[in-house]
């Protein structure tokens, strides 16, 4: 089994998943990276939107606004301003 197939199987976790045209630029791009905690890190990009998810963090941006969520903090950025919320 190729490394890509192994990573896909690990990400799918036994679920059936469909990725129609995920490699076409008009539909965005999807990447999965191996991590040390056993679940892959996910990067999804559809210009100008970005999503990056790890086991302990999520980052989302639409080009004008951004949100970073970790177990300890939530950081929001918009129009050059920054707001940090501690949990």
Image (cartoon, rainbow, N blue to C red):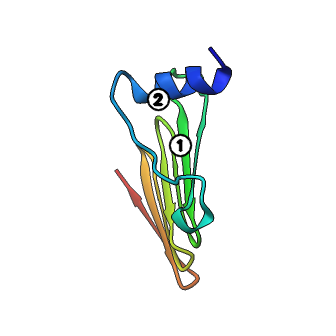
Q: Residues within 10 Å of mark 1 (few under 14, many from 20)?
A: some
Residue that protrudes farthest toward the bottom in the picture: 79
Position above or below: 71 against 21: above
Q: In which quarter of the image is the N terminus?
A: top right
Quick one: SS at disc 1?
A: strand
Q: Which residue is drawn at 51% across and 20% down?
A: 38
Residue that protrudes farthest toward the top in the picture: 1
Position above or below: 65 against 52: below
- Spatial CA span between label 2 and label 1: 9 Å
Name the residue carrying label 2.
11
**Residue 18, quarter of picture:** top left
As rendered, which of 24 and 86 lies closer to the eye? 24
Task: Work out whether mark 2 precedes mark 1 in sequence or the reverse, and give the earlier one.
Answer: 2
- Report the side of 40 relative to 70 (left or right): right
Task: Give how far across and how far down residue 23 sits, in percent.
Answer: 60, 53
Q: How many labels does the image show?
A: 2
Q: Which of marks 2 and 1 is in front?
A: 2
Q: Which residue is drawn at 52% across and 28% down?
A: 8
Q: Which residue is drawn at 41% across and 29% down?
A: 12
Quick one: SS at disc 2?
A: helix
Task: Give how far across and how far down residue 63 sits, in percent.
Answer: 57, 76
Position above or below: 38 against 85: above
Name the residue carrying label 1.
42
């Amino acid at each position: 089994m190729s490394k890509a197939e192994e990573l896909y199987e690990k990400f799918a976790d036994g679920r059936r998943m469909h990725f129609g045209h995920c490699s076409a630029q008009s539909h965005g791009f999807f990447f999965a990276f191996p991590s040390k905690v056993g679940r892959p890190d996910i990067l999804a990009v559809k210009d100008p939107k970005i999503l990056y998810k790890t086991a302990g963090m999520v980052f989302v941006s639409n080009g004008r606004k951004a949100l970073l969520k970790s177990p300890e903090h939530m950081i929001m950025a918009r129009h050059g301003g920054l707001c940090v919320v501690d949990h």
